[in-house]
Amino acid sequence: MQKAIKIFVLLLFLSVGYSKAEEGSKKLYKGTVGGRAVTMYLKVEPNQCGGTDIIYGIYKYDKVSNWLLLNIQRNEKKNYALTEVGFTGVLVLKETNSGFSGVWISPDATKQLPVKFTEQAPITTKEKERFDKILDDTNYQYYDC
């Protein structure tokens, strides 16, 4: 009987851990590109086929632009390439303890600006839902037929 309880508890912990892993993460970042204030939202989902996680993202220049959709790639050294859809710029970032740092590069590679993002305090479920909707709407703007 005690063995059955231990197995049940173990399976319960494994199922909770598995559902949390499937959930992925959603994080909000604030920072700067050059001297301009920016906000970035990243949504990470596990790749159901194995391999690296799938990362979705948007960012905007605060009080200046609409949300820009990002195509995101990451390597095993935690280096990121975030290409603005429409190739209006590229962010090349390195993950840090507090967020990201790196450089924004113009499409013609003639201009480079320093970039720094700091992760904001964990966002609420309501905020995650709001940013997920913005991400979905931005994706729709770029890719709707």
Image: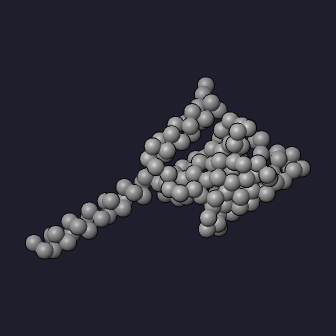
- The image shows residue 118, relative to residue 43, as above or below, that is below
x then y, percent, for residue 56: 58, 47
x then y, percent, for residue 63: 70, 39
Q: Quadrant of the C terminus?
A: top right
x then y, percent, for residue 45: 50, 52
Q: Residue sitting at 37 percent across and 55 percent down? A: 19
Q: Is residue 91 visible?
A: no
Q: Residue sitting at 47 percent across and 54 percent down? A: 24
Q: Quadrant of the N terminus?
A: bottom left
Q: Is residue 144 visible?
A: yes
x then y, percent, for residue 76: 62, 66
Is residue 100 rendered to the left or right of residue 26? right
Residue, far right: 110
Q: How is the image coloured?
A: one colour
Is residue 141 rendered to the left or right of residue 51? right
Residue toward you, 72 or 135: 135
Is residue 41 rendered to the left or right of residue 25? right
Residue, far left: 1
Q: Residue sitting at 15 percent across and 70 percent down? A: 4
